[in-house]
Image (cartoon, rainbow, N blue to C red):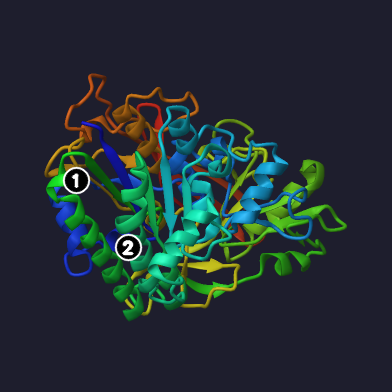
């Protein structure tokens, strides 16, 4: 029988908020299918990075989407390239002559086999485009709740809005938009197109976390509303017509931590007489892409300037992990930094300095552990992601359907990068050499023959003396065979 796959994204859901009270349908699904209890996001733990890792099976240093926003003056000469906007994704792909992604993606692979893919999103238009960035040339459907312009083909979007009404207003919770895209999938997009693979992306709880805080009443309502739509999907999937041919993978792309204080890294840098342009080079040849996890680019990679900035950052109370070009497989060129390759973020588009602002393990106002410094417009008490705390790197993943085992708890480490190779294996397609994930054979109803790998966990550390005291950072990762999962990064 021909199998179909639905990948449902619960954007930002923290794994410790997957509970019977908040997510009864997700917990029911986990008990019936496979629950991946040690699932991991890719770094940076940002949506556009992880959506791309989902459809390429690779990490940011391989697929080239090195963060939610990137430095590329050829695309956006006066500001960072915001990949949350579909037109910026299209412009970047044109600038890179079709090479925005350095690896093959799911939509391209399916199209090469004559199959259709549908990407539906209540989130940003850019993330929706990255799910199938070649949709305009290779076919398929990209549907965004945010209007006709970001969609392809536009005729399809016009038909959906004509049938189901105009897009609901955004909200926190964003329940109306989530219900809208679920309805569009169930009543139109799947029946009309019968896609082999569908990615259906919910904007919550991520959006409500950001502005209302993790554990706030609004965030709890957002989780419950998203889970209710999952319940609709489950009811549909378990009908006789769907039960034997549909597989469902439900995942979150990352977790969240609470914003405890805002700090402008660019303004702080000016205190030592170095100006940085926001997404463009300043007169001194320094550019910043600011965020909780941000990047500093230095013209011609000037080693003295990189050293000066990184050493100054190590003194700052808001500075967390720092990564630079590798001196070797572990250490960065600047003393006290780690190599970008160690967090799988080594790519020509990555910053000369990739930084994560400092985190802690204290509870927020609602009792949810994990706080950070941030450099954005988000409110203090809201939340963010992108970094290396365990609350961001550990995410949700449950698989259900005829291709997967029943009632199985998997304690073997797994990650977002494993979804593509697992799908391709189940579809009978070749897995590209660029794929860094593994086939989740332990979860499959028909387990393929192969070696059983024992996870190996290791912590790497480096330090440097500063006028403010010793800067010391650590990174823990786990390897299963040749696949690497990041566990936690922190500083003392």
| Residue shown at 77% from the left, 42% from the top | 301
> Circle 1 — which element?
helix
In the picture, measured across the screen, residue 126 lies left or right of residue 237, that is right
- Reading the image, the residue beneath label 2 is 183
In the picture, measured across the screen, residue 244 lies left or right of residue 44, that is left
| Residue shown at 29% from the left, 56% from the top | 186
In the picture, measured across the screen, residue 137 lies left or right of residue 189, that is right
Distance in Å between CA atoms under marks 2 and 1:
17 Å
In the picture, measured across the screen, residue 274 lies left or right of residue 345, that is right
| Quadrant of the image containing the N terminus | top left
> How far across and down, in percent of the image, does residue 106 sit?
45, 37
Task: Say whether residue 281 is visible.
Answer: yes
> How far across and down, in percent of the image, does residue 401 sit?
19, 42
> How far across and down, in percent of the image, does residue 153 sit?
53, 51
| Residue shown at 47% from the left, 28% from the top | 112
> How far across and down, in percent of the image, does residue 331 sit?
58, 37
- Reading the image, the residue beneath label 1 is 242
Task: Say whether residue 43 is visible.
Answer: no
Observer-nearest residue: 246 or 451? Answer: 246
The quarter holding residue 5 reads: top left
179, above or below 135, in the image: below
């Amino acid at each position: 029988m021909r199998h179909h796959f639905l990948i449902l994204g619960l954007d930002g859901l923290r794994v410790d908020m997957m509970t019977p009270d908040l997510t009864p349908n997700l917990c029911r699904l986990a008990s019936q299918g496979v629950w991946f209890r040690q699932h991991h996001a890719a770094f940076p733990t940002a949506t556009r990075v992880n959506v791309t890792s989902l459809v390429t099976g690779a990490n940011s240093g391989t697929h080239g989407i090195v963060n939610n926003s990137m430095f590329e003056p050829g695309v956006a000469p006066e500001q960072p390239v915001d990949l949350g906007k579909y037109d910026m994704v299209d412009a970047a792909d044109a600038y890179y002559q079709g090479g925005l992604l350095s690896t093959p993606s799911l939509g391209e692979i399916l199209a090469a086999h004559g199959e259709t893919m549908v990407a539906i999103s209540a989130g940003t238009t850019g993330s929706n485009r990255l799910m199938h960035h070649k949709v305009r040339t290779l076919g398929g459907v990209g549907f965004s709740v945010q209007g006709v312009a970001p969609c392809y083909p536009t005729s399809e979007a016009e038909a959906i809005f004509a049938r189901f009404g105009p897009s609901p207003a955004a909200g926190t919770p964003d329940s109306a938009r989530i219900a809208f895209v679920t309805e569009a999938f169930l009543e139109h997009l799947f029946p009309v197109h019968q896609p082999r693979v569908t990615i259906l992306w919910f904007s919550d709880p991520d959006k409500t976390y950001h502005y209302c805080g993790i554990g706030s009443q609004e965030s709890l309502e957002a989780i419950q509303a998203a889970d209710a739509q999952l319940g609709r999907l489950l009811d549909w999937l378990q009908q006789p017509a769907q039960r034997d041919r549909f597989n469902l993978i439900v995942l979150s792309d990352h977790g969240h931590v609470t914003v405890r204080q805002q700090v402008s890294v660019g303004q702080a840098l000016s205190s030592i007489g170095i100006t940085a342009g926001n997404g463009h080079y300043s007169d001194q040849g320094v550019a910043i892409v600011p965020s909780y996890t941000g990047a500093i680019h230095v013209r011609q990679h000037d080693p003295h300037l990189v050293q000066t900035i990184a050493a100054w950052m190590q003194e700052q109370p808001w500075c967390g992990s720092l990564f630079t070009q590798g001196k070797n497989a572990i250490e960065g060129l600047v003393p006290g930094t780690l190599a970008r390759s160690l967090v799988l973020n080594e790519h020509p588009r990555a910053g000369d300095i990739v930084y994560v602002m400092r985190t802690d393990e204290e509870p927020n106002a609602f009792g949810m552990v994990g706080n950070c410094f941030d450099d954005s417009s988000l409110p203090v008490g809201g939340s963010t992601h992108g970094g290396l705390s365990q609350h961001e790197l550990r995410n949700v993943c449950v698989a259900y359907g005829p291709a997967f085992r029943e009632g199985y708890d998997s304690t073997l480490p797994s990650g977002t990068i494993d979804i593509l190779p697992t799908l391709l294996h189940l579809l009978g397609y070749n897995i590209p050499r660029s794929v860094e994930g593994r086939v989740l054979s332990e979860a499959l109803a028909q387990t393929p023959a192969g070696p059983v790998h024992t996870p190996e966990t290791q912590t790497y550390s480096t330090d440097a003396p500063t006028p403010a005291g010793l800067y010391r950072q650590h990174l823990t990762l786990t390897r299963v065979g040749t696949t690497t999962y990041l566990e936690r990064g922190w500083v003392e």
